[in-house]
Amino acid sequence: MVSIRLSFIFLFIINITYSQEVNWISMDKALELQKKVPKNIMMDVYTDWCGPCKLMDKNTFQNPDVANFLNENFYAVKFNAEGNSTLKHNGKVFSNPGYSSSKSGRNSTHNFTKYLGVYGYPTIVFFDDASNPIAPITGYLTPEQIEIYLNLFSDKKYLNIKSQEDFKVFIENFESKFKS
């Protein structure tokens, strides 16, 4: 009985020690924080019905290396591409006038989603420290795949990418630091 308790306590401590979660905030909060401490934004654009979005939440964003890197280098934002929120960005107000709370499953696309040029889910959109969109990356990404983009967009490295060849060289020289 004592060994079972000790095993449980040991597993609980390991889980607390190695468990790291992404500090998700709203876009409004990220824009507010950028004014005080400029940092790039990483936005996870998802929908409620999207299976790959849920897998990315489970397999990628719950990875401790991904969570730590995001929390240290970005303001991490979750945005429902079909939600009914109102958002202010660069002097414009975005909403989802076609949203219907009576719909189950798919809903109309939010105007901010359209503004960002997002047409597939999941999509990760990176913004610079002045909140200008840099690039959308569409599709499910594993921790190993997203690490490349997090590294590229966490600072100004992306400004050196002028062609597909430049990106190829960046990837060839990239050294992963994530454990898994």
Image (tube, grey):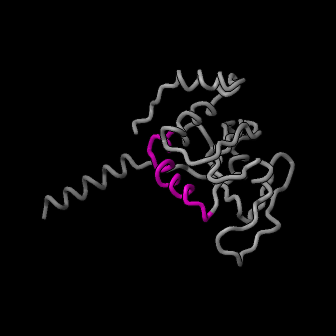
Task: Give left or right: position of 92 versus 68.
Answer: right
Q: Is residue 13 magenta?
A: no
Residue 61 horizontal/vertical position (percent) = 51, 49
Residue sitting nearer the eye, 124 or 17: 124
Residue drawn where x is 52% and y is 52% of the image:
56
Going 64% across and 48% down the picture, which residue do you hit?
A: 123
In the rendered image, the vertical position of residue 15 relative to residue 156, given as above or below: below
Q: Magenta span has 57?
A: yes
Q: Work out which residue is located at the far right of the displayed protein and give it.
A: 91
- Front residue of 117 and 153: 117
Furthest residue toward bottom = 102
Main SS, magenta region, reads helix
Residue at the (59%, 35%) spot, across then down: 149
Q: Nearer the viewer, residue 104 or 87?
A: 104
**From what the image shows, is residue 92 above or below residue 146?**
below
Number of disc labels: 0
Quadrant where the image shows the C terminus? top left
| Segment tinted magenta in the rendering | 48-69
The quarter of the displayed image where residue 85 is located: bottom right
Q: Is residue 102 left or right of residue 178?
A: right
Q: Is residue 40 above or below residue 88?
A: above
Where is residue 64? Give x, y as percent: 44, 44
Q: Position of residue 144 (x, y in %)?
A: 48, 38
